[in-house]
Amino acid sequence: MTLEQKIGQFFFPAVFINDTEENIQQTERLIKEHNIGGLTFFHSRASAATNYESKKKVEFNDDSYQRLKDLIVRYQKCATTPLLMSIDAEWGLAMRVEKTPQYPYAITLGALPERKIDLVYEVGKQIGLDLKSAGIHYNLAPLADINNNPDNPVIGYRSFGSNKEKVAQYALEYLRGMSDVGILGCLKHFPGHGNTNVDSHLGLPVLQENLEQLLENELVPFIKGIENQVDSIMIGHLAVPALNDGKETSATLSKNIIEKLLRKQLGYDGLVISDALNMHSVSKLYDVKGQLEWEAFNAGNDVLCFAENVAEGIQEILKNANPERIEASLNRIMKCKQKAGLFDENLSIAADFDFKITSELNRKIADYCITDLKDDNSSVVLFDAKNRERLAKLSIYKAIDNPFFKTLGPILPSPEYAIENANDLINTTLKEDLEPFDTVLISLFVPKAKPLNNFDLEDSVLEFLGQLFKTKKCILYVFGNPYALQVIPNLEHTNGIVEMYQDFVEFQESAAEQLLEDKKGKGSLPVSIRGI
């Protein structure tokens, strides 16, 4: 390779599974002309995280998985040096590709008792096999962020929790599962994105901790990862003034954080990848095309993820970088490509995914993550013969034919009602219908995992719930992000609260069976929730 071709290996531009033929051909030219090192796959341009404020509608495509496989074959054919194909699939291919297996969020896995950590390993392994079936070699996951800020707008459910030891342990098991089937992993977002309240896709979060505090908490999972030879570490777009002479420079652009702290002090010599360079916390800093890419490389990143100015970035690095540094980064990338089997003549592609295996694994996780948050004689309230006649079931944001109610129905029959959106409170006689009942079993299907707009829980629905809790005996099952509990009023008036984390069929059926058998939940809340 020429020096220019070696530099091309540092670039991992974004590609979109559901893109136009014109865009696909542009990518092919990029591969041929610049010898880029890899690609990072996203579903579509509208779904990329920094685009959501543009309100572009995401078009769903049932053929995305096949398209992904075909594109990978097509792009590899253009490459002189085999491409390292990457994707951010924290909870499986389904994060980017429809009609593919979805596994529970990290927060759900964090609710599992430590004796069931083997299930975290299995999730990593199955995600790895699913990625392998598509031709992907590198998962930009899991998070090593400790979610110790309940107001975090972007980490939340993506973290294993607020306990540094548990986050480290569970992240390592997830990585081990992927590694055992030949998939590279990545700990992110160094030096720790948990204690922030700004979304780095849109702005620059600032961590106020000093080095001593970071070593005590945020850095623990990364240090454990380094001790276990983690394949790669992603640098987060967040500023730590205490490590940067008081300046609010993004860690991705900071030599102090990458070269001094991560490389020298913590002794990490593996691959360092930047967080996506299109994110607004850094993408608008430089007017000259290629300058951001050079600054990110100069700070110590080996791989420039979602680089938008490939040609210009290569020239800037060529002009400014010393050859030793270029060789060092190239060697790290080649080592990863070798580990992923890219230079093996008979690189095996795994068989297509199997939904049955995913379902069985999800059911096991559901059984062990059920978390009883409050229990004021819930079973007596529900199963006492006198109460049974005055019991109603209420589903919020799903129709009454949901698996939770269907599983309960034969053994715990009662009238069933649903609020599928706020209009149901205006256009129906629901409030009057519930009047005769003393006890209401409520299944709340939280509409969104992200906290934006109160998880999409409508004000009138929240107000209605708050009133219901004060006037009836209520047992609440939450199928979704537990942080949603922070926006629900009058929870102290409920008789019982059970957190289920996901709305998968397996989780609904598991919750119903646990209730009918009157068993205690085996999970524990992995984060602190205000008011709980």
Image: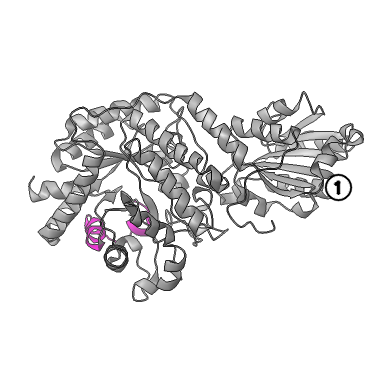
Q: Position of residue 406 (x, y in %)?
A: 71, 25
User: Does residue 28 appear in the picture of this structure?
Assistant: yes
**On the picture, is 466 further left or further right than 501?**
right
**Quadrant position of residue 90:** top left
Where does the magenta region start and end? 278-299
Residue 376 lies, with reference to residue 292, above or below; the image says above
Kindly identify the residue that appears in the image at 45 percent across and 68 percent down.
Answer: 216
**On the picture, is 187 further left or further right than 148?**
left
Kindly identify the residue that appears in the image at 43 percent across and 67 percent down.
Answer: 214
Q: Position of residue 236 (x, y in %)?
A: 38, 57
Quadrant housing the N terminus: top left
User: Does residue 190 appear in the picture of this structure?
Assistant: no
> Within 10 angstroms of label 1, few (less than 14), some, or many (20 or more) residues?
some
Magenta stretch contains residue 319: no
Q: Nearer the viewer, residue 49 or 174?
A: 174
**Quadrant position of residue 193:** bottom left
Residue 252 lies, with reference to residue 363, above or below; the image says below
Q: Which residue is mark 1?
A: 471
Residue 229 lies, with reference to residue 77, above or below; the image says below
Extreme-bottom residue of the structure: 245
